[in-house]
Amino acid sequence: MPENREHIELRSDEVQEIMSHVPNWMIRWGITLIFVLILMGLFICWFIKYPDVINGTAVLSTKQPTISLVNKMDGEIDALYFDDHVEVKKGDVIATLRNTLGGEAKVYLEKLCSQVKESEKEDYLNVSFDDEGLVFGSLQADYQLLKKSILDYQYFRENDELEFQIENLKEQIHNYSNLHGINNDQSNRALKQLKDAEEKFESDKRLYEAGVISKIEFQNEEKKFTQMQNEVSNLQKSSIQNSITITDLKKQLNQLEHELSKRKNDYLLSINSHLKTIQNALENWSNTYEIRALTDGQLSYVQQLSESMFISAGTPLFAIVPANQEYVGYMEVPKQGYGKLEKGQNVRLKMDNYPYHEYGQLDGKVTDISLVPNEEKYRVEFELLNGLTSSYGKELEYTPDMSANGEIITEDLRLMERIFNKFRKLLD
C-alpha cells in the first residue's frame, strides 16, 4: 500500500509541473554570480587604499615667530600711527601713550642730541638752541643742565684769557730761544777769538821774558786778553740766564696748559654726562610710552583700539607678522601611535577659520618629531608643501597662530590589509 501511494505522488500533476519547469537565471547562475562578486570585492579591496592617520591639534606659524607688542604701563592711547594690515618697518612707532613730553619737544631733543654728537669735533661751538614754546615735561631739568653746560663751554672758549696767556708765553719762549741762539753764536765766536788772544798773549809773554818787547807793551796785551776773557764770561752768563728764563717760561706754559686742559675737560665731561642723561631718558621714555615695530612685517591689531582709550599694562595690542617668511606648523599628537611617526610623512590640515568643505585643506610634510612628550603629548613640526594654497586652489589669508585639525598619514594601507588586521585582532 505505501508503494502505491509513493508511485501516485511521483506521478502527480504538481510534481510533473515542477519537474518540467525550467529554473530562472538567478537559480542557474546564482553561485557563479556570487563567486564573481566575491572576486570583484577582493579585487577592489586590494586596489583601494585607506590611509591610517593620527589626529591632533595644529597651529600654523612662521619660521620667524609672530611678534606680539604690549604696553609696559597703564595709560591712555595718545596716537595711533598705522592702520590694521599695513606693512611696517623695524623701529616704526606704531602708537604712543599719553605723557607730559610734547611730540615736538621729543623730536627737538632727538635732533639736539644728534647735533651735539656731531659737533664734538668742532668743540660744540656751532650748537644752537631754539626751544621757545616747547614742553619737555619730566625731561625739563635734564635739558636745562645740558643746555647750561654747552653754553658755559662756548663762553669759556670765546672769552677765557688762558689761551691768550698761553699764546703770549709761547711767543716769549720763541723770542728767548732765538736770543739764546744768538748768544750761543756770539759765545762761539768769542771763544775762538779768546783762543787766538791767548796764543798771542803767550807769544808776547815769551818775547817780554826774552826782553824783545817792553813791559808796557806786554801789560797792554795782557789787558786785552783779560778783557776778552771777561767778554766770553759775560756771553756765557747771558746764555745761562736765557736758558733759565726759557725754562721758567716753559714751566708757566705747562701750568697754564694744564689748567686750560683741566677746565676744558671738566666742561666736556659735563656736556657728555648731561648728553648721556638725555639720551638714556629718551630711550627710557621711548620704551615706556612708545610701541615700536621690532621687525619688518605686516601689522595686525589684536583688539579694537582708538585714541584716548585706556589700556592696562601688559595688554597685547598688536602683532607683527614677519614679511616673506616660510610657514611652519606645530602639532600636538597623543602618545598612542607615536611609534608610527616618521619624518617626511604627509600632513593634512583642516583650518578652523576656513571651513574644509568650502576652502579645502592644506598639505604639509613632517620635518621634526619631539623625543620627549609634554603632558602625554608629542610635538610634531611640519612645513607646508604649497604654502597657503589649499587643495581647492584657494589662497588663504594668514593670521597669527592659525589653528587647525591636523591629520598625519602614517600608512597608506589597502582596504584588504585593514580587513585582515581586524580579523587578526579578533583572533588575538
Image: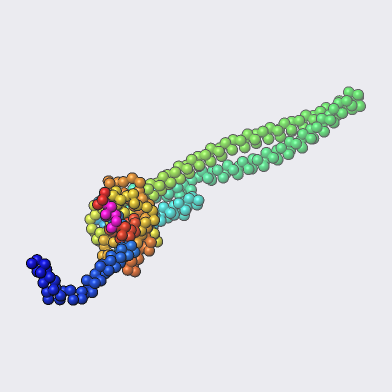
Quarter of the view holding residue 37: bottom left
The one nearer the camera, 305 or 295, is: 295
Residue 172 sits in quarter = top right
- Dividing the image into 4 quarters, which one contains the N terminus? bottom left
Task: Give the residue drawn at x 77%, y 34%.
Answer: 191
* 35 magenta-colored: no
Residue situated in front as seen by the camera: 377 or 74? 377
In the picture, measured across the screen, residue 223 lies left or right of residue 76, that is right
Nearer to us in this view, 270 or 165: 270
Residue 119 in view, yes or no: yes
Q: Residue 150: x, y in percent? A: 43, 49
Task: Identify the residue at horizontal 45%, vertical 50% (top origin).
Answer: 154
Left or right? Give the position of 115 relative to 355: right
- Residue 21 at x, y = what percent? 18, 76
Q: Position of residue 344 (x, y in %)?
A: 39, 56
Task: Determine whether 146 is above or below 301 in the image.
Answer: above
At 36% from the left and 58% from the top, the residue drawn is 346
Magenta residue check for 421: yes
- For the image shown, how many numbered marks are present on the structure? 0
**Relative image position of residue 103 (x, y in whole percent):** 33, 58
Q: Main secondary structure of the magenta part?
A: helix
Q: Is residue 206 above or below residue 37?
A: above
* Residue 148 visible at all: no
Residue for point 50% across, 39% down: 259
Provide the residue span drawn in magenta.
419-425
52 to 167, vertically: above or below: below
- In front of the other: 331 or 67: 331
